[in-house]
Amino acid sequence: MILMSNEMNFSPGLEGKVDITILDYLEKTEKKFGDKNAYQDDKKSIGFSELVRVGRSIGTYILKNIPMKSAIVVCMKKGVDSITAFWGTVYAGCFYVPIDVQMPLERVEMILKVLNPRMIICDKDGEALLRQIKEAKELVLFEDVSASMEDQAGLDSRRGCMKSTDLLYVLFTSGSTGVPKGVTISHSAVIDFTDWICQKYKMDENIKLCSQAPFYFDASVPDLFIPLKTGACLYIPPKSYYTFPKKILMYIQEKQINTLIWVPSALCNVIRARAFEVCVPDSIKLVIFCGEVMPCKYLNEWRRNVPDALYVNMYGPTEACYACTYYDVIREFRDDEVLPLGKECENSTVLVLGENGLCKTGEIGEICILGQCLSYGYYNAPEKSEKVFVQNPLNNEYAEFMYRTGDLGFVNENGELMYSGRADSQIKRLGHRIELGEIEHAAMTDSKISNCCCIYNEQNSDIIMIFCGEQSVEQLGMELGKKVPAYMMPSKYIKLANLPMNINGKTDRARLKKEYGG
Ligand code: AMP
């Protein structure tokens, strides 16, 4: 079944120019809005003019040292400076790769091995982390790179060679073989998506966004780019506010934020913490969520408390630049109903494929994505890319790239895509995409672990690690903490003499899930 989009066509924001990059958006917006705030964290804010000025300084520093199209890691605390560093790398014709300053060392090491970056821009926190890693070469401090004297000719020359098909960023997601996968995304994918979302939801300079997702996570993509296109402002509250949802609602009220682009877990936490009993912001007009299932019982609570907002369920993997389908919630849903994933966004085509090709209405198949929104594959990992970026099996005439999501779904009678779960052991926990295989792989590197399997309990977001070997539960927990980020840490450990096998001789995950998963 092919989903038919009911969107009208529209022209891109910078008519007539083929090779536009996000810098053209930034500079067009700067001409219009000058010193208006683009991004604001709890310590500082930056206007569009200053963003261009500092971005060009950073770009100058980079271009004097390394060639175009190089990978530049930005390992800084989430805030105004890290965003400025992103745009600085782009001014040098390079692409940025955000790394969290709290990521475990071993994971950072793996990422740096895959990436082999030409430069790492860090702040003091990032520097403290990276100094412990021998692969971390070419460290430069943000305060040094941002103080360079602008080289206009050098920047112009780089700019003249940039193409909209160039890479803009690489985001690392969880990988089932234990090594994180670097998803490559081009300027044109981001530009198409940004054009579409801004037009569809009539976004302009009056939009005020509240940043929830970390920048190494693709849920932050609209937050970062909408200001460049429209002159909107992104507010970045302290991370701790999300642990106390009442604080975040008060922050939204104080800043008069009108647009939330959050993962469902963050929205659900507001309800679980009964935060609306303390504050109901009167400014929220649009709530977009993406990245995991939004349970209707929590959505209904939001709708009861903030009835004037439009709620939108978006769907898509990092490999398709944030989202490839959307559903505007325009009717009532019972608490136990499932929200549709909806119709295609402007720059993507979605197919539901079964063993015999295109699935009929109501028939479950794998959700596959085609179009400009797609990644070019995983950075420096051709074998992994070949497994999921494949030729569209419905096209025998010419090469057409298609991404197999591993998500199962079907198209309902209204022509809307519906989600039916995953075909593999990838999970979503509090909005984070996790391959259980990555945690298992990390545990198996411990010589005292002979076998292990992770299962996931969706109800209470628990990852349960079942393992065999001589290692103690405490020690295993400590060892894992050095290898995987906090959001991947099991909440429970069960030690068994042996893991049960199924008839194919594989670990019987289904049995383990039945016995220990709920
Ligand atoms: P990520 O790459 O972190 O964005 O994760 C992508 C995966 O999240 C998809 O392949 C789906 O399994 C899941 N996902 C994304 N959006 C939704 C949604 N609206 N409803 C259900 N699952 C979703």
Image (cartoon, rainbow, N blue to C red):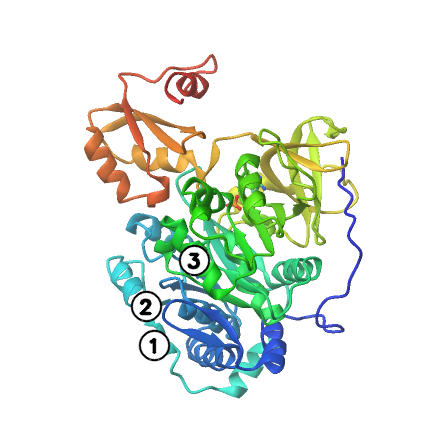
Q: Which mark is residue 123?
A: 2
How many angstroms separate mark 2 from mark 3 (CA)? 29 Å
In the rendering, at what x and y percent does residue 123 appear?
32, 68
Residue at the (59%, 79%) spot, across then down: 33
Amino acid beneath label 2: Asp
Which mark is first along the chain, 3 or 2? 2
How many angstroms separate mark 1 from mark 2 (CA)? 8 Å
From where the camera sits, is residue 432 visible? no
Q: Nearer the viewer, mark 2 or mark 3?
A: 3
Q: In this rendering, would 308 be left or right of 454? A: right
SS label for mark 3: helix
Vertical side of 34 occupied by 14: above or below: above
Q: Which mark is residue 143?
A: 1
How many angstroms separate mark 1 from mark 3 (CA)? 32 Å
The answer to whether marks 1 and 3 mark residues whose Cβ atoms lie closer than 8 Å is: no
Q: In this rendering, would 492 be left or right of 3? A: left
- According to the picture, the residue beneath numbered tag 3 turns out to be 250
Q: In this rendering, would 122 be left or right of 251? A: left
